[in-house]
Amino acid sequence: MFKRLKVLGIAAAAVTLMAAPASAATVIDFSTGNASEGGSITWDGSNYIGTNIPIGAVRIVGAPQGNTTYVVGGNAIDGDGNFWGSLDFNTNEGSNFMSISGCIPGMSIGTFDANGACTVPEVLLSGTIQGYVPNAPQGLLSAFGEDAKNQELLAYIGLGPNTPFEFFGFSLTTYNIAPGGSSTAISTDIRNTAVPEPATMMLLGTGLLAAFRARRRQQQQQQL
């Protein structure tokens, strides 16, 4: 009886771990940081295109190592004349994408000159916008989709290059935009949450449950 309960308990624990990684998962959060407003956003009445929107920081939470906030530099110029990482995106079907390029000095990602300025940015995040909620008159945009991270970034925080991530949550605030008009970005937030090997936990849990049920049937047949 104890052995059966032990096997069932292990299986249940595996399934629970599979369902509960969100509370302990790694979060990679690109945002405006200390950058001021900047870049260009156009709206045609249904779709958005954004170019050179300043991304000034990336925050790491829950990673095996390197959990803190890092400055992101690059080629995007904000309203104060400072250079930051650059966000570009397009929500039009067929050409929908988003990407962030820049340098992260604290992770030694990118190429820098003698003064520490970013001279050759790297792609830090690239993905596809799969859905969005337009609200241009109020200057708001929310979107989601799949993306891939810079492998040097993942290695620095102790994650493997193929670590899966849930859909990014992309929110952006602008000034009011009329159809056919344009605006600058006031603030941006792009959040990603890692998914720690759910397939492995599922296989472990279902495998142990199957073994328990097979053993139970065998014992019942022996009793007949």
Image (cartoon, rainbow, N blue to C red):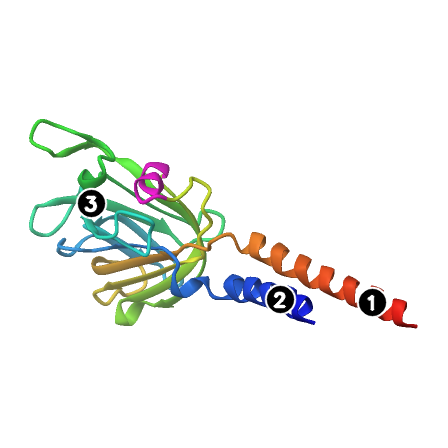
Judging depth in this view, the residue of 159 and 117 nearest the camera is 159
Specify the quadrant of the image occupied by residue 123. Answer: top left
Report whether residue 75 is seen. no
Q: CA distance from mark 3 to mark 2?
A: 49 Å
196 inside magenta stretch: no
Q: Residues within 10 Å of mark 1 (few under 14, many from 20)?
A: few
Residue matched to label 2: 6
Closer to the eye: label 3 or 1: 1
In the image, what residue occupies the spot 60% across and 68% down? Answer: 9
Closer to the eye: label 3 or 2: 2
Tag 1: amino acid: Gln
In the image, what residue occupies the spot 14% across and 53% down? Answer: 35
Tag 2: amino acid: Lys
Q: CA distance from mark 3 to mark 1?
A: 62 Å
In the image, what residue occupies the spot 12% across and 28% down? Answer: 113
Report whether residue 133 is seen. yes
Judging depth in this view, the residue of 200 and 37 nearest the camera is 200
Classify mark 2: helix, strand or loop: helix
Residue matched to label 1: 219
Residue matched to label 3: 72
Classify mark 1: helix, strand or loop: helix
The magenta span reads 151-158
Specify the quadrant of the image occupied by residue 224. Answer: bottom right
